[in-house]
Image (cartoon, helix red, strand yellow):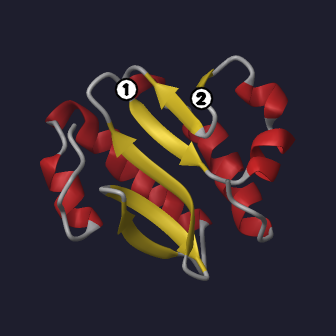
Amino acid sequence: MVRSEAEDVDGYLAEVPDDRREVLTELRLLCRRELGGFAEVMAHGMPAYARDGVAEIAFAGQKQYISVYLMRGDVREEFADRLAGQDMGKVCLRFRRPEAVDLGLLRDLLRATAARPGPVC
């Protein structure tokens, strides 16, 4: 997916291909449930969750994968063992197929993010 021009997350989800919409909707619901006190915003053309105006989590449906951006280095370090076997860039956790999205791992990452503020990269 090319960078979205959607004004909100509902608009973003309406644009994604059908085969990815269900899991991205589940991911959105998970973010909303676990990230209490965060604002749901569009940032850099993708849904993001910000605390005090700073995005700490974002996700996107890309052409080749579904990506989750973990912008907190302290959380990535805390979960280094669990992330070691994943397709992980500097801040981007990638899932090649919608059915491969590990919602349990993502839930734990979101809970750790929500538990305390920290610096973003």
Q: Is residue 32 visible?
A: no
Q: Residues within 10 Å of mark 2 (few under 14, many from 20)?
A: few
Which element is circle 1 on?
loop
Give the residue at x 22% y 64%.
10
Q: Amino acid at mark 2?
A: Gly
Report the quarter where the N terminus lies. top left
Residue 8 falls in image quadrant: bottom left
Q: Position of residue 43 (x, y in %)?
A: 38, 63
Q: Would residue 72 be visible to someone looking at this image?
A: yes
Q: Is residue 45 above or below residue 89?
A: below
Q: Pick the residue in front: 25 or 76.
A: 76
* Mark 1 crowd level (few <14, some 14–19, many ≥20, 10 Å Cα): some
**Alpha carbon of mark 2 to alpha carbon of mark 1: how far?**
13 Å
Image side of residue 42 versus residue 12, left or right: right
Q: Which mark is residue 65?
A: 1
Callout count: 2
Numbered label attached to residue 89: 2
Q: Amino acid at mark 1?
A: Tyr
Q: Position of residue 16 (x, y in %)?
A: 19, 43
Residue at figure coordinates x 67%, y 53% from the top left: 121
- Residue 5 placement: quadrant: bottom left
- Between 96 and 32, the one lying in front of the other is 96
The first of marks 2 and 1 along the sequence is 1
Disc 2 to disc 1: CB gap under 8 Å: no
Q: In the figure, residue 28 lies in which quadrant?
A: bottom left
Above or below, 9 relative to 53 = above
The one of 119 and 49 positioned closer to us in this rendering: 119
